[in-house]
Amino acid sequence: MPSRLGEELEDLKRRSGRSYAALAHRTGLSRSTLHRYCQGATVPGSFGVVERIARVCGASDEEVDRLYRAWRSPDGRQSPVGQESAGQDDSGQVHGGPDDTGPEPPPHDGAEAAAGGQYGGHGQRSALAAPLRTFYWLRAAALLLAFVVTSAVSVTSYPGVWQLPGRAAGKAGGQRSPAVPGEQQFKGPLWSLAPKPVPPEFLGLTLNTDTGLMPGFRTGSVRLWNSETRWGTIERRRGDYDWTILDRMVESAERERLPVLFTFGGTPLWAASDGRNPIFKDSLASPPDDLDDWDRFVEKVVERYRGRIESYELWDYPSHEGMFSGTVSLLARMAERAARIIRRLDPDARVACPSFGHLRSERGRSLLREFARTDALESCDALALKMPPRKPDGPPEEIIELAADVHRLLHEEGYNDMHLWNTGPDMSIVLAEPLDARRARDYAVRFYLSGLFSRHYGMRRMYFYNWGGTGLPIVVQPVGGRPTEAGLRMGRLARWLKDTSIVSCGEGGRSGLAEGAYTCRFERDGRALRVYWTTRGRAEVTLGRGAQRLRHMDGSTTPAREGDRIGFGEEPVMIEYRAK
């Protein structure tokens, strides 16, 4: 049975609307430690830890008093597992704070107050409680003020660390305004790390076909949506499943050795009573009336394709009322239930939380933030999102800025290492004018390169939207037809990056390039590879020691050597270096 202290902490946590991850971020405790406290499995050895959690949850003084009495009571002090050491979480780290300075002395005749504790013996405030509270909160306020001032200086003075291409000047495409007087300058990449493999599935495509045909150029993974594989298409009547199309798509992907991302969405007409906002004739945006129907469908899909479908996206585009008209809390419940089923039936499958969009709008960000506070993200391996440029014809490098904004939002909610999967554009894509042939071929390649540049912000997959469609700004291959130049160049980039590891990325003057120019460094078999491109116009770079070969997107190759001055533009190029 949970302790009384655990029950009261859990009530406060639920009332606050914050997830365990968000509370962990704000209290300095781990998620698992917070979960144990709120479930009553263990009890903190220091009441300062309890008060810290309570204050973050917005507890009043009266509620803190009640928590103290619960902590002091036998029910609170003796938990099913036992009492933890003061200020320590499950990692063994000690977390300091104004009211968490180590183990407290035994309560006896006001000894806690005399020793600096907030509460006296027998659960009553001591004579020193009020002035000591004032002292501690003044000290906390001073520390917070120092932190805010330091942070403000850091963000202002070091934009290369916290800001990203385009943010300093408020422009798209990496254009920066002149340096602020006194701004710290540096030379080098925006970020670098030990070599990390670029998995083939990073370069993905959403398939807009039910034929079973696959791309005629190299790609790394496929996403099923607009492929007649919605819930409402498969289960037109309760318990009556038609797997014909999904079988065909999965079998074709298996032949091509392409990992499949199956996207859930589209409530069947029979499963919801209000029938709200349908975009598809066979499906509804309304959530199901009975979540048991949802559970059964998820079970049927995972049982049938266990080990064959590599990953699952738990709903498509819930930010659009035509795709999902339920509440965020209900969507979170659906995601948690589905994730549990997938973990049980196919532990090797990966799970991506629903793909929110409109992330440059206040409403879109609010929906994502609300979802993050439900704890549903704890159930997922990745967060699928709609992350396009500002406009369908805008530079793909605007994805980098959006990825950084999302990373910042998730960090604020306590998720510092969430993997992001970009599942494509917003609905406006269907109304956009076609790009001309040159811009289309360059955009298609830079879409993936911008995703690789965004690795620093958690980006792990990019699904281009889409393959097979002909009514979009960029056509990469019509179903049954030949690949366009844009599609061929996508395949060429996949070959360039085969078996590589990414090392660093940078842009502009700090990386020794013209403003609006980008570069990423890769390694393969001991050889360095550098890709260069711009958002607009031309730039040049002088090649360093070991330069051997220059590859162009049209498939041609020319010799290169140290000291050569080479030009590049919106069409990326790659420099290969000799092995060290």
Image (cartoon, helix red, strand yellow):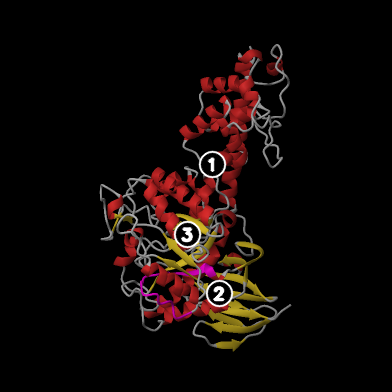
Q: What's the CA distance linking mark 3 and mark 2?
A: 45 Å
Q: Nearer the viewer, mark 1 or mark 2?
A: 1
Which three-letter amino acid code belongs to the residue tagged 2? Answer: Tyr
- SS for tag 3? helix
Q: What's the CA distance linking mark 1 and mark 2?
A: 38 Å
Compare marks 3 and 2 and give the one earlier in the sequence. 3
**Span of residues in magenta:** 201-217
In this view of the protein, which residue sits in the foreground, 362 or 279? 279
Q: Which mark is residue 22?
A: 1
Q: Nearer the viewer, mark 3 or mark 2?
A: 3
Up the image or down, 308 lies above or below 320; here it is below
Compare marks 3 and 1 and give the one earlier in the sequence. 1
**Can residue 429 be seen at all in this image of the molecule?**
yes
Asked if the residues shown at circle 1 and circle 2 are in contact, with their CB atoms under 8 angstroms apart, the answer is no
* 10 Å crowding of disc 3: few (<14), some (14-19), many (20+): some
* 10 Å crowding of disc 1: few (<14), some (14-19), many (20+): many
Which three-letter amino acid code belongs to the residue tagged 3? Answer: Glu
In this view of the protein, which residue sits in the foreground, 12 or 133? 12
Q: Residue 176: x and y, percent? A: 50, 62
Question: For mark 3, what is the residue?
Answer: 303
Q: What's the CA distance linking mark 3 and mark 1?
A: 34 Å
Q: Which mark is residue 532?
A: 2
- SS for tag 2? strand
Q: Quadrant of the C terminus?
A: bottom right
Which three-letter amino acid code belongs to the residue tagged 1? Answer: Ala
- SS for tag 1? helix
Q: Residue 6: x and y, percent? A: 57, 29
Q: Residue 209: x and y, percent? A: 36, 72
Compare marks 1 and 2 and give the one earlier in the sequence. 1
